[in-house]
Structures are given as C-alpha cells and as structure tokens.
Image (cartoon, rainbow, N blue to C red):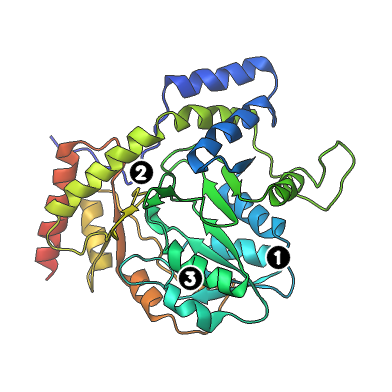
Amino acid sequence: MKNKNIPLAKPLIGRNEKRAVLRVLNSGNLAQGPVVAEFESSFSKLVGGRDCVAVNSGTSGLVTAVMSLGIGQGDEVIVPSFTFAASANSIALCGAKPIFIDVDRKTFNLDHKLLESLITPKTKAIMAVHLYGLCADMKHIIEVAKKHNLFIIEDAAQAHLSAIDGQTAGTFGDVAVFSFYPTKNMTSGEGGMVVYKDSAHSRNARLIRNQGMEKRYHNEIAGHNFRMSDIHAAIGVEQLKKVEEWTEKRELNAMYLNKAITEAETPYIPNGYRHVFHQYTIRVEKFRDSLADKLNADGIGNGIYYPVPVHRLPSFNQNISLPETEIAAQEALSLPVHPSLTRSNLDRIAHSINVRLSELR
C-alpha cells in the first residue's frame, strides 16, 4: 500500500476550539468584544505581562507596529531581505523606506555586525525578524539601538515561545508582532497580536486598529479597520492552552531529524536559544530544487522560504549586494516538523533526504 503524503504543515483544531466558536456564534456578539479582550490578557502572560493588542492578521500587526511608533514619510527602518515580504511591506505602507540588511549564514537572521554601516540620520528603527522560530541576536541589536536611539520592532510572526536565556520573543524590543495564520505554531484562524513595552504606544495601536477612535464616532487619527473578531479570538484562547505542548513536540521532532539527516546541513541553534521550529529548514547546496522535486515525488511536503529575496521583488527592486541572502534563497529548504508527525513519518523524511541527495551527488 502506498504511503500517505506527509504535509509540510497541519493546523490542529480540536473540539474545544469548535465549542468556543459555537459559544461566540450563539452569543450574537461576533465582532471585537470580550473574547478578544480575554485573548489579549491570556497572551500577555506569554510575553512578561506586556500590553497586547489583537488585530486581524500578522501583516496588520506589523503595519500597526510601525505606524504606532510614529514612523512614516522620510524615515528609514533596517530590515532583513531574507524573510516574507510583509516585513518590508509594513514599512513601505507607512511611507517609510526599508533598508535591507544581509543575514548571518548560520541563523538566517539579520547580521548585527552590519547594522552600524546602514544607520543614517533618517534611521528610526531596526526590525528584527525571528525567522523560522529562532530569535535574532537581540543582545547586540539592543546595544546598537540604544547607542543610536532607535526603536526595535520584533517581527515574531514565526516565534511564539522562542527565547534567549529564558527571555521570550516579544519582550526585547519596543513592540513585537505575532501571527496566528493557520500554518503558524498556534492559530486563531487568522489574526495577529501586537505587543508593547510602552502603554502610550499601545494606545496608539488601539486607535489605529479601530478607525482612529477609542470613543465611537470621535476619531482622533486616521486609522484602519484591523479589528479581530471574537470568533477568531475564541480559537486563539483555546490554542494558547496547547502551544507549549505543541512546541515541545516540534523541538523533539527537530532533534530527531538533526540526528537522522546526515546528508544535509541541519538547523543551527546558538547556546542559550530556544528554537521553536515554525519551520525546520536545512541547507542544500546545488541540488535544492531537484531535491524538492524528488521529495514531492516521495510524498513528503516541503517548502522554499524564501526563493526571491525581498529587495529583488518588483515592489522594491533595489540593486544592492546581499551575498548571504542570495545564497540562502538558493539553498534553504523547509521540511515537516509539526506536532502531528509520527516516528515513522520522521524516519521517512530523513531517509528520503539522505537517499535522494546521495543519488543527486
């Protein structure tokens, strides 16, 4: 009998989530309401009690984060090019200019050693993306930000519960953004959470997400409709109860693959870091695309995150040199690591990787 396909990602929605949604539907209060407030309060416990503002997507969260800090026309924000386009899009959508920085080869995160060379009088913030579930080097990023009086924005869309020496993602910068898209380590169906160090900035965020008003029809600023519904929040509240258990399973799966995969470069974890493996990403020199094709033929889900560096997308089209970013875009390949995987699944993944790469070489 043919083996079933192993999906790259698999959202986990249980009875409790369905019951929670049904309670909201039965209540008749479907828009932003008490369940959103409950979700914000519950999520705050994961990020050191910081003020949390729920929004309708991770991208909305990033736009809110940038806008709430007063960053706009004529300003610059340093951001990696090796990431999803939403990071840079959020900067551009606020009228500011993304200044793209190269990444560290081992971690795929921004190379802090290059920060000083990119700072100008127009620089207002550093957007540190915690890619694949691994925190960026926040110690050195914070040092540079303090020296130059810059804001730090954490794009933690993929980094729920990620940590450095026990300090969790979302608690290092002035503002952080998490995503609850269905493929993330936890979901609300769709949604995001903006996490603030300063309550003045979080008030700005609450205005931005609700058409610029705190009191109905008394609009203080020009805002957006970024509100999360109670339906989505109900899913998020239940998922929060499970995310630690799921994260531990991801870590165990990743450690198993690290030992079983012998023919490719497996993910690097710096000392003291908790990698939560939103993506389990290997490096494959020369044969990445061919390997992806063969894995698909073997029924093993995989993904290339990200094949085109953001600075080369038509929306930005910047002619700059980011050598490590270009190499990463050619070599990175993500494999299944989600909590639903069995030991047999993991063995199939590793075996296929090892055998197929040996054939290609």
Name the amino acid type tagged 3.
Ser
Label 2 neighbourhood size at 10 Å, few (<14), some (14-19), many (20+)? many
Secondary element under disc 1, as helix, strand or loop, is loop
Residue at image location 90% in from the left, 42% down from the top = 218
The CA distance from mark 1 to mark 3 is 19 Å
Q: Where is residue 153 drawn, in percent x and y?
A: 57, 60
Residue position for label 1: 71
Q: Quadrant of residue 246?
A: top left
Vertically, is 275 above or below 80?
A: above
Q: Nearer the viewer, mark 2 or mark 3?
A: 3
What residue did someone put label 3 on? Answer: 81
In what quadrant of the picture does the N terminus appear? top left
Q: Nearer the viewer, mark 1 or mark 2?
A: 1
- Cα–Cα span, label 2 and label 3: 24 Å
Tell me which numbered mark, 2 or 3, is placed earlier along the sequence: 2
Q: Mark 1, mark 3: which one is toward the viewer?
A: 1
Q: Nearer the viewer, residue 148 or 331?
A: 148
